[in-house]
Image (cartoon, helix red, strand yellow):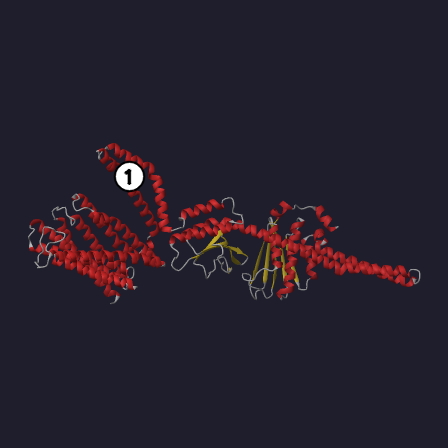
Amino acid sequence: MTPRTARIVGWGLAALATAILVPTAVLAASVPDRGAQVSPEVVTIAVAISLSFSLIGALILSRRPDNRLGWLFAAAGIAAATNWLSVAYALRTLASDPTALGGRFAAWAWEIQNPVSIGLMTVFLFLLFPDGRLRTRAERRTTVAVIVAICFAAAGAIVAPTLVEFEDVPSPIALAIPESVAFALLVLGYVLFAGTIVASVVLLVGRLRRAAGRERDQLKILVWSAAVATTLVLPAIFVPWDAPHTVKRVAYLLAGLGFLLIPISVGVAILRHQLLDIDLVIRRTVIVAVLGAFITVVYVGIVVGIGALVGSIGNATLSAVAAAVVAVAFQPVRRGSQRIANRLVYGERASPYEVLHEFSERVAGAYADEDVLPRMARILGEGTGAERAQVWLKVGPQLRPTAVWPNGAVPSRPARLRGAELPEIADVTYAVPVRDGGELLGSLSVTKGASEPMNTTEQKLIQDLALQAGLVLRNVRLVEELRASRTRLVAAQDEERRRIERNIHDGAQQQLVALLVKQRIAEQLADRDPAKVKKLLAELQVETGQAIEDLRDLARGIYPPLLADKGLTAALESQSRKSTLPVILHSNGISRYSPSVEATIYFCVLEALQNASKYSGASGVEIRLEASGSDITFEVSDDGRGFDAEVAPRGSGLQNMSDRLEAGGGSLDVRSAPGEGTRLLGKISLREATRSDPPDSSSRQSATQ
């Protein structure tokens, strides 16, 4: 059947059910008050239930024509409409003439149809929801069992000598069958029918435990509505036959209202399930149910129980005592009901509010501690019921899993960043970025099993945790960067000491040893060969001068005198002339600054020149120095082969430059792409630098000396 045909047939069946229900409502309104279970109020509720099944069936056939539940709902609506038309007509007719044959046939037809309507609205619905298919052997066997049960119940109603719901009205057909046979058929049919209802509910809950994603949310909605409906139907099942008519009427009215909830919830689950936060609905339902039961038990126990003992059930004092007990115990009971609801919805997990509260409480004042990230991962994992929770930290161009829960879980591989967006991570179910001031600092991620997908509440919880974790990750990253920077500084200092030691050992030390050897030779030849001694002394003078020059070069490598004496521009011009590449230097507004600022910029530019000479393959380098307000900026650019700055890790040279600048309150920006050369842009704040090292002419003088 095409979707258009299904839509036309669905709305046609809904129109037919409505046409049947209109006279049903009219007849029900004119029925005299008989005080039976089939009262006018109950018939009115039944009309509403029938109409809801028909309309929802038409909607399902219109929007989900491939879902067989649409046909089930349409059939249930027609069956219920004809069923309740029969009972309304029987009530109206038998009220004036208990012997009227038409009224007796209508009541007889209603008792035969009743198990069919209830079976379609309960057992078949539970077995076929949400897509209209029977999936397991147990579901197929339950379907056969409910059909057999309906047949037994209908057969018992057919052969019974009197109508079951109309005890004083004889059956319209007289069959020579003992009443015990009819009773046995009815009991067997309805007992088996009750068993199939229980079996269908068990199978429904089992599918809920195995389901995932959208189907799980849909099943939650139906299970919730069925639980509420069962709670409201139970009083009608167990109400005594000799109970007052008003009590019976209220019980059956509540049962009808509860049953009306089922088709409405099914319509929401199939058509608009994403609009309903079912976990929130379940929690509030449990809280209301527990509070209602508590108030009822207290009132009945005090007013009715104690009142019966003292012989004064309507005592106003007892009512006041009951009200006082409820008022005093209300808050503790409400908190207990919330814990029960949270445990029911979230299992062993805490509620989202409790997770956020615990996170805020535990990291307050301790967000730089080593334990904060594992603690954050634990709270994240326990709050979402995840198999694995991870806290990621941005380290250079990568995201690295810094903390993982539970202990012993295998962390994911580092993920490479491209830009400021979170990359896709293969073995993670859900991940959110952690930002502070718009800067990406890290991420929170969870990994869940296939049967436990992420729902909207858990996603919102992780997003809220990420908002609070920004400052935490920033401080943790600062601590980690400080430690790494200290390690690099120590390593750089050790390397520089080794370089100086090698230079002294291989250069000046060897020259001084040679001078010492020649001096001893000259001493030995002083008396025997004065001419040769004179020649040796001349060589000693030349070599001593060379040793002095080498020592000066070594000293300039530590801190160039030209930088201390004449400043940045002169020192960089001198180094540019020694470079293996052509260098163009532009200086705009550069004057004299503190030794720390000048040394930082000087050695950063020298490092950039060395990198360009060794690795870039460029034909030339351009240096730009510019002073603007309280900042000094420099740029070193080349036309070499370039590299991917977002992917390639920073080498020791670039890292040393970045450390130097950051130590002075500055920053380094590396811009490069394959085939497009490289640009290094550095910036240092004079305001930040002068706080720790103000300009001092004596320091420059001492450096020169």
Q: Amino acid at mark 1?
A: Val
Q: How packed is label 1: few (under 14 Cα within 10 Å), some, or many (20 or more)? A: some
Q: How many marks can you see?
A: 1
Give how far across and how far down residue 103 sits, in percent: 9, 54
Q: Which residue is mark 1?
A: 298
Res. 455 image quadrant: bottom left
The quadrant of the rendering that contains the N terminus is: bottom left
Residue 159 in picture, x, y percent from top left: 12, 58
| Residue closest to the eye, 406 or 517 | 406
Q: Quadrant of residue 142?
A: bottom left
The residue sitting at the right extreme is 527
Q: Residue at x 59, y 62 (%)?
A: 678
**Residue 61 in view in this figure:** no
Residue at the location (25% across, 39% down)?
300
Asked if residue 219 is positioned above or below residue 307 in the image, the reply reads below
Q: Which of the pair 118/504 is nearer the observer?
A: 118
Coordinates of residue 162 in the picture (x, y in percent): 10, 54
State whether residue 94 appears in this view. Answer: yes
Q: Nearer the viewer, residue 53 or 311?
A: 311
* Residue furthest out toward the bottom: 1
Q: Secondary structure at mark 1?
A: helix
Nearer the observer, 478 or 290? 290
Residue 183: image x %, image y %? 15, 55
Of all residues, the one furthest to the top in this rendering is 317
Asked if residue 517 lies left or right of residue 699, the reply is right
